[in-house]
Amino acid sequence: MPIRIMHVVDTLERGGLENGLVNIIGRMDPVKFEHAVCTIRGLGANLDRLPVERVQLLSLADSGSVSRFHTPALIRAIRKFEPDIVHSRNWGTIEAVLAARLAGVPAVAHSEHGFEAKASAREPWRRVCFRRLAYELADRVLSVSYQLRELQTQRTGFPARKISVIHNGVDRSRYYPDTDDRARMRQELGIKQTDFCLGCVANLLPVKDHMTLFKAVAALPENGVDWRLLIAGEGFERPRLEAFVAGHPGLKDRVTFLGSTSRIPELLRALDVFVLPSIAEGLCNSLLEAMASGLAVVATAVGGNPEVVVDGESGLLFTAQDVAALTTHLSRLRADAQLRANLGQGALDRVRVAFSLESMVQAYERLYIDMRAGVRVPAVSAG
């Protein structure tokens, strides 16, 4: 009999967690595994990428649940699907651990994928207590990076040895270098082939700290090489960022807000450099996708970023919110095409060896097989 897994997520909108879930479901053996996806706040754009013919979909928003307390609705959804395993992800779905236990599900997993705010921010004590309770109730607790595992251990006191690490993997059949795509996308966007083109793919939220990137490009010295900045993503920070651009005449014709888009692979191929200025991260899928596209990447040395980027070999790291350091990195990369090429090749090699989609899917398949067999705590962490 196949293993029946219910994945509980906040939404299926575009984002790293959601992209990763779609990749996992799409590539797991359909003979050995059956899937349901239950969302708290509705579906979203990633629904189009799910193999919906073999995935059951449930949404608490569609069921009329408007309470801030979702446990009763989750119990009903769980009993409808009758899973062998319930797997919740991030704080927004942590009630699913309690619901699964109350519904009598044989095995329960909970994953931490990232942050809603700064890693240094203090969480309310009620949240810390409930998170610790959920960890104790779950059969397996997972994290996408070792740094995130250590942080949750510090916050909750839950032993790090009981938290497995499974790194995200990147789909290299979708993300790869392509010079023809680069030329076509640049022509479509009105970017000259000789322009130095930067980009960032991230939700427009405070934790992603786009403002540091905007201040850095505003400080780029004029050196005869024109530059462009493409911003893909949507969020409530957009008006503030647009106001900053409007207030700096040198940025108005160089910064383009693309909003939410499904054309991320093509967009990445149009870039010279990918920038991730986040003040906190789990393990960023957009960073992996940029590296698989052969780009030189510049990222903050936070969260799982240093686990992905070997500084000076597969990208450049800088301290979060350090505008001067980011400006220096971008100036170097604008002036040195060979450096960009070397870092891009290093990025390609890095994701091929250490962050393949195949290894991630295999790790989750092993996880679910072990869970149904009753293995509570792993012998070693994956990743």
Image: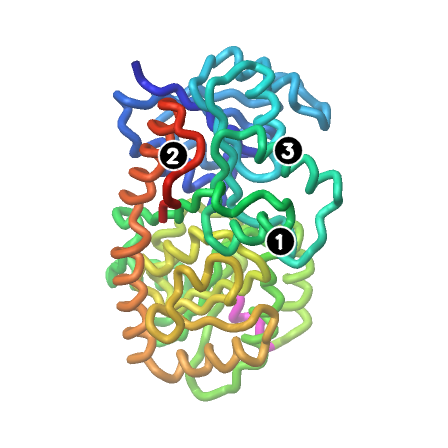
Q: Label for residue 360?
A: none
Observer able to see residue 62: no
Quarter of the picture holding the N terminus: top left
Look at the image and give the residue range highlighted in magenta.
250-255
- Whether the magenta-drawn stretch holds residue 230 is answered as no
Q: Position of residue 123 (x, y in %)?
A: 71, 48
Question: From the viewer's perspective, is the residue at label 1 or at label 3 nearer?
Answer: 3
Return the disc, 1 or 3, that comes first in the chain's sequence: 3
Q: Secondary structure at mark 3?
A: helix
What's the CA distance linking mark 1 and mark 3? 29 Å
Which residue: 32% across, 34% down? 366
Question: Which comes sooner in the sequence, label 3 or label 2?
Answer: 2
Q: Secondary structure at mark 1?
A: loop
Mark 3 surroundings: few (<14), some (14-19) or many (≥20) residues within 10 A = some
The residue under label 3 is 133
Q: Residue at x 47, y 34 (%)?
A: 140
